[in-house]
Amino acid sequence: MRLSQMYIRTLREVPNEAEIPSHIWLLRAGMIRKLVSGVYGFMPLGFRSIRKIEEIIRQEMDAKGGQEIHMSALQPAELWQESGRWYAYGPEMWRIKDRNEREFCLGPTHEEIFTDIVRSEVSSYRQLPLNLYQIQTKYRDEKRPRFGLMRSREFVMKDAYSFDKDWEGLDKSYRDMYDAYEKVFTRCGLVFRAVEADTGAIGGSASHEFTALSDVGESEIAYCGQCDMAATTERAACVDAPASNEQELPMEKVLTPGTKTIEEVSNFLGVDQSKTIKALLFKVCGEKEDEFEYVAAFIRGDRELNMTKLINALGIPEHSIEFADESQMAEATGCVGGFTGPVGIHDCKVVVDSELAGLKNLVAGACEVDHHIKNVNYGRDYNGDIVTDLKLLKAGDQCPVCGAPVKLARGIEVGQVFKLGTKYSKAMGAYYKDENMEDKIIIMGCYGIGVTRTLAAIVEQHHDENGIIWPMTVAPYHAIVTVVNTSDEAQTKLAETLYQKLLDSGVEALIDDRNERPGVKFKDADILGIPVRITVGKKAAEGMVEFKLRRDKEIMELSADEALEKAV
Ligand code: ATP
Ligand code: MG
Ligand code: MG
Ligand code: MG
């Protein structure tokens, strides 16, 4: 490609909104373009690198027997209601309606969709195991979209789902994916660690996060020099720890379970009545499927509360409600199974839906049996929506496995693998018939890689004060031939010959044939970070060029042929 014809615009200044190197350099290199907060488009060079990452992922997924499909980003609410996540997912889910008021979401992830395919199309043990994946656009209305591609509201993810006959099958599928992820991130040139993680809103029994080490990363990991313990700091608090994470905080006022009026409950809670109703509805609506729609719409604030209609719909006596005690609340919030309910500990952080702030003596859970905090009180134990409450490990604390002092590091979560088990297959009825024609439940796993976030993580680990330094595997182009003076015939001729020879030998090459000052060209080449640079200048007439690798300082003076040989 000729730079004189290429659609490219590098920036001399650091864009205002960019704080971290990957965001700065991807913008300055003209690789990405912001549309609105958390939504980016890819320009020619950026898109080439994205495609390279995708190709690496495809190869490693296919090597493990993964089969690529492509599902819609638009997903009907009904499937999410079946799994129970329609409400549980919270405001990060992008909800929309069609012209007939039917509800949809723009998928933040695809467990429901893939489970739906398999339950309707897999019937026999002969069809299992199965691994289906896609590379597709996801939508999450992140509370704080930031750092460019790192945390955006629209992003590309590779998501894979495994379907097995039994738990041993899942173990193998999980190991295969783990192995594939190590290969993918190694090929992308990342320095990373796979660490044990919580299962969070996705749910399931075991999980690992793949974390690219970086000081600007939003994840903190704890690892041990003595043993192989490595986990997110939240998770490390729970790793192999005895059930002592079960904490009981002092109780505030207690409302005895039984039948109360809404007014009584509201007075007790010190909140207005509509809040109490919302809290209660959450419990009730989980059990009454046909009323779910109405209630969900109300909870989201799409509909006004009509008390009479509501009470009729729910079939409860007017002004009389049953107050959920703490165990019912725990059940309703689903925190044991890994739902992020109105209150629950997600990644071991207490998360409270602001709608429910004001309820007292709640149970918060770390998505794991015996890892709960009882009597969590808004205002007292947390304020706002997230407050860390579990004993997060600090540097030097004892490793929960061997007791040695732990070390901490920061990183970027580029991927995560989950053993889902039967969470979705059970909720949505995904079964197969075994050899004896008996119905057996399908055991699932899911595996995500943030493709666009991986691009940012690579830049984070591969840049200097002048720009990006692409690893060859994901570089938009391998080599750039720079013509110092385009009005010098000898230079142009030699550069064109070199460029053509590079292309002929399969090197993805650029030629900077723009009529610009050499300084501008060199600066741009630095920003773009193309791994191999061949400069054709004054010595062109003698057949000599300068050869330089972007990552090295050293410049070699070589004959054109030698340079070509080195570049190929
Ligand atoms: P985070 O903890 O950073 O919010 P997550 O745990 O919510 O991420 P997953 O549900 O595990 O994300 O999704 C799989 C992968 O998708 C993540 O490992 C990450 O690489 C990527 N990803 C998630 N959220 C975003 C986002 N907002 N922008 C870009 N990539 C994302
Ligand atoms: Mg998230
Ligand atoms: Mg995460
Ligand atoms: Mg994750």
Image: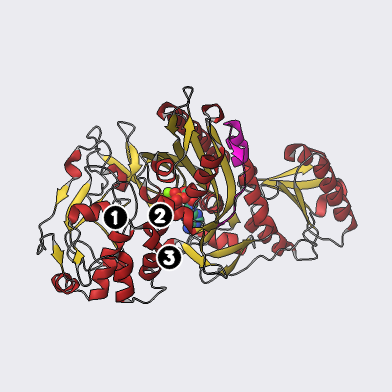
Whether residue 170 is visible to the viewer of this picture, yes or no, is yes
Q: Position of residue 209 (x, y in %)?
A: 42, 43
Contact flag, marks 2 and 3 (Cβ < 8 Å): no
Say which label, 2 or 3, has the lower sequence index: 2
Relative to residue 322, is residue 189 drawn left or right? right
Image quarter of the C terminus: top right
The kind of secondary structure element at disc 1 is helix
Q: Nearer the viewer, residue 52 or 549?
A: 52
Q: Position of residue 84 (x, y in %)?
A: 39, 53
Disc 2 crowd rating (10 Å Cα; few below 14, some 14-19, many 20+) is some
Mark pair 1, 3: CA separation: 24 Å
The residue beneath circle 1 is 333
Whether residue 215 is visible to the viewer of this picture, yes or no, is no
Q: Position of residue 483 (x, y in %)?
A: 80, 56
Q: What label sits on residue 144 in the rendered view?
A: 3
Mark pair 2, 1: CA separation: 11 Å
Q: Which residues are magenta?
A: 57-74
Relative to residue 246, is residue 46 drawn left or right? right
Q: Nearer the viewer, residue 287 or 346?
A: 287
Colour scheme used in the picture?
secondary structure
Contact flag, marks 1 and 3 (Cβ < 8 Å): no
The residue positioned 59% from the left and 57% from the top of the image is 467
Q: What label sits on residue 37 in the rendered view?
A: none
Disc 3 crowd rating (10 Å Cα; few below 14, some 14-19, many 20+) is few
The residue beneath circle 2 is 85
Q: Nearer the viewer, mark 2 or mark 3?
A: 2
The kind of secondary structure element at disc 3 is loop
